[in-house]
Image: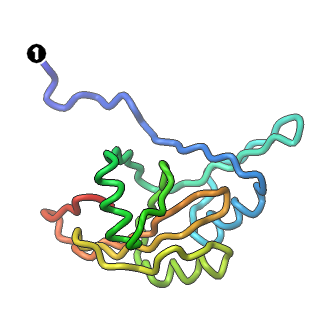
């Protein structure tokens, strides 16, 4: 008999990103985006890692057609590489402005999507293509199709 609520096997999603300019990438995501430091480690040979708390994590698996659709809706053309990191924020416009001031390149300004979120695209340090999105519908029974 299967358990009604199986115990999750995965406890955390951790995305590991190599950044040639480690200090700049940490400053951008910690200071400009506001991700708090959870832990820092240093090792021999100048090896360094900073683990930033990004809140709740999900893994979104999209087929090529959905990836193309999201790019069309949010940007108007195909721009995202195979991997895109999305951050839910309270104010997409203010966050976009803050991230651009901190060194990100705006790819597309905050854009209203059919799934009722305001999404902006940026190229960020560590060669990451990112989305900042603000959910506009906050009713508990309403879920967006995708971030």
Point out residue 64 in the picture as x, y percentages from the top left corner.
Answer: 34, 48
Image quarter for residue 41? top right
Vertical order, 95 against 143 (above or below): below
Residue at the limit of the structure toward the left, as seen here: 1
Residue found at x 54% / y 44%: 15
Residue 144 shown left or right of residue 16 in the figure = left
Task: Name the residue tied to disc 1.
Answer: 1
Image quadrant containing the N terminus: top left
Point out residue 57 in the picture as x, y percentages from the top left corner.
Answer: 41, 50
Residue 72 shown left or right of residue 120 in the figure = left
Residue at the limit of the structure toward the right, as seen here: 45
Residue 142 shown left or right of residue 7 in the figure = left
Residue at the limit of the structure toward the top, as seen here: 1
Vertical order, 91 against 42 (above or below): below
Residue found at x 59% / y 57%: 128
Secondary structure state at the residue bearing disc 1: loop
Point out residue 43 in the picture as x, y percentages from the top left corner.
Answer: 82, 36
Residue found at x 23% / y 28%: 6
Image quarter for residue 98? bottom right
Vertical order, 10 against 13 (above or below): above
């Amino acid at each position: 008999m299967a358990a009604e609520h199986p115990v999750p096997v995965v406890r955390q999603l951790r995305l590991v990103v190599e950044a040639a300019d480690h200090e700049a990438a940490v400053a951008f995501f910690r200071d400009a985006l506001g991700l708090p430091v959870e832990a820092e480690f240093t090792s021999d040979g100048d090896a360094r890692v900073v683990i930033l708390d990004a809140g709740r994590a999900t893994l979104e698996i999209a087929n090529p057609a959905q990836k193309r659709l999201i790019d069309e809706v949010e940007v108007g053309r195909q721009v995202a590489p195979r991997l895109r990191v999305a951050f839910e924020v309270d104010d997409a416009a203010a966050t976009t402005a803050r991230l651009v001031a901190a060194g990100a390149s705006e790819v597309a300004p905050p854009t209203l999507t059919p799934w009722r979120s305001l999404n902006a695209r940026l190229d960020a340090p560590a060669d990451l293509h990112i989305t900042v999105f603000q959910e506009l519908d906050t009713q508990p029974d309403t879920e967006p199709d995708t971030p």
